[in-house]
Amino acid sequence: MTSSARPAGPKARDISVDVLIMGSGTGLAAALAAKEKGLSVLVVEKTELVGGSAARSGGAFWIPGNDALRRDGANTSAKLVKTYLDDLVGEDAKPARRAAYVEHGPAAVSMLERMTKLRFIWSKEYSHYHAERPGGSALGRTCESSPFDINQLGAEKKRFRPSAMGSSPISVPVTGTAYRWLNLIVRKPLQAIVIGFKSVILKGLGAMLLGKFHVASGQALAAGMFEGTIRANIPIWTRARVVELLSESGRVNGAVVEQDGQRFRVDAARGVILAAGGFDHNMAMRTKYQSPSLVEDLSLGAEGNTGDSINLAQESGAGIELMDQAWWFPSVKAVKGEAPKILLAERSLPGSIIVDQHGERFLNEAMDYMSFGQKLLQREQEGKPVGQMWLVFDQANRNGYMLAGSLMPRMSLPQAWYDEGIAVKADNPRDLARAAGLPEDRFVAAFERFNGNALQGKDEDFHRGEFAYDRYYGDPTIRPNPNVRPLTGTLYAIKLVLSDLGTCGGLMTDEHARVLREDETPIEGLYCNRQQRSQRVWSNLPRRWRHHWSRHHVRLHRRSGHGQPLAVPDAMRVDKSSSRCAA
């Protein structure tokens, strides 16, 4: 849809409200929480579309103890959650922040189910990323939204951000659980057909006959929140960029907002909440804080995520931390003019390996995506860069599973991949190495070593398949290890790049989501959630972000004195595009 065909949305003007929220992704959760408390709210969105990276994400969240988990029979023991987080995060994050997350997170989920038409479900068996650690769980504590009818947005549907996969005229609301089994349609056809019938026929095509258009994952989450703000009469200004935070006597009390070249003053009596995403597409910041090798913009985050809120807060004295972190995601190198294609289940499936520029394996391919990226950057810092990565797989793998979210089993690789040097094909490992420009002897040795161990169902080097998360996306028909088997026959190799679903370092905050100065004193009236807030918990990725991207919530309540809103964001986290980010 062209810009001219979209509704313009509300016209900006000078205005006074209780709470100003910068960002229309998870910022909508903050808006709904404030509205439920009787506060007047305004949301401003820099781009022309509502939904932020939340709408492009996998939409899953890790909030232990919430009502959806209780309804579906999950173990909601707070003691186990505390054990897990304490062991995994340790001294890297202040206990008060972890405690606030665990204590108030369930209230975020309850609030969203009260204030919207969203209903959440447990993604049973979506394992913690580190399920083997004390307090971890192979059954997981991840939830996502049930499919949501996006037609409930009415005319505002045209202002809603489409998914990273683009818009489709056919409703196919595939949840995270459904994706797992649809990916195995060749190997486990009965389960896949049953789930496909529910997703495609009942919730998809069947619902369309009734005038509905169901979406899933981040689309469902963001659309549900958007619909809730519409019913709550919460204004959302689009094309509205915050250019300055206003303050008086050291307290932030509003902002200057620019829309269509005109500037307006917004006074916010209770404060400003920053929920505008990270610095995904600000390559100067990425090379400065993350890696000098990150010169090409490969992020899948919303295009408006350029670090504005971080820079604005720093001008008000805010401190920053964990700026080297992102929701890293290994992806297929993009064809010219397109975006990278993320890999999720593909890395866990048998009949495949990933090698570095030397033609050698360097990690457990099935590990969670964030740890994958951290491993790559760690090697770079150690002077052992991975360089060009290749996903190597055999014909049986191509025949049995989906690839890159778009290629069904048995489909040929796109000719453009071969034309642009992204893919190569050969009948044996030596010829494949030659075609890919890899050291032939080293690749053949690594290939044969992996195959030798795989005959016994083992990965002696990196222990692939020994962890619950590995096995979730494995092939249960392959025994004894659903993630490992020898590669045989025709071989393929495709170039991989390190993409991401957004950055997750940023502003220093306390357990109330108040933005802090470097000396850890709060900046009164300034609060923060989402990717522009540093997240020590997520730097260790306890669980899942599911293909993407983190959902957060804001708890607001009245306080004595000036009565500022108290925000406890980060209680929710997102999966991007089709990826899950973790908790």
Image (cartoon, helix red, strand yellow):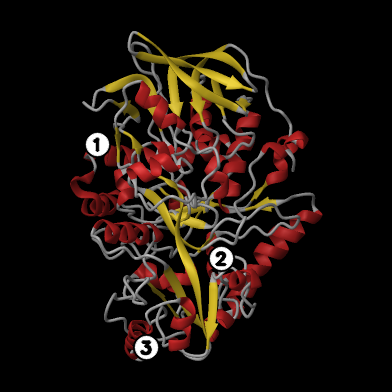
- Gap in angstroms between the C-alphas marked 1 and 2: 36 Å
Rendered residue at 29%/51% (across/down): 81
Per the image, label 1 sits on a secondary structure element best described as helix
Question: Could you tell me if residue 566 is visible in this image?
Answer: no
Per the image, label 2 sits on a secondary structure element best described as helix
Dot placed on the residue nearer the N-terminal end, 3 or 2: 2
Query: Looking at the rendered structure, which numbered label has been put on residue 367?
Result: none
Please name the residue that numbered disc 1 is placed on: 96
Number of numbered tags placed on the structure image: 3
Quadrant (top left/top right/bottom left/bottom right) for the N terminus: top right
Please name the residue that numbered disc 2 is placed on: 179
Q: Amino acid at mark 2?
A: Tyr
* Relative depth, front residue between 517 and 169: 517
Rendered residue at 49%/36% (across/down): 111
- With 137 as the anchor, is 36 left or right in this view? right
Rendered residue at 23%/53% (across/down): 83
Query: Looking at the rendered structure, which numbered label has been put on residue 451?
Result: 3
The picture places residue 538, in percent across and down from the top left corner, at 34, 48
Q: Residues within 10 Å of mark 3 (few under 14, many from 20)?
A: many
- Asked if residue 441 is positioned above or below residue 82 in the image, the reply reads below
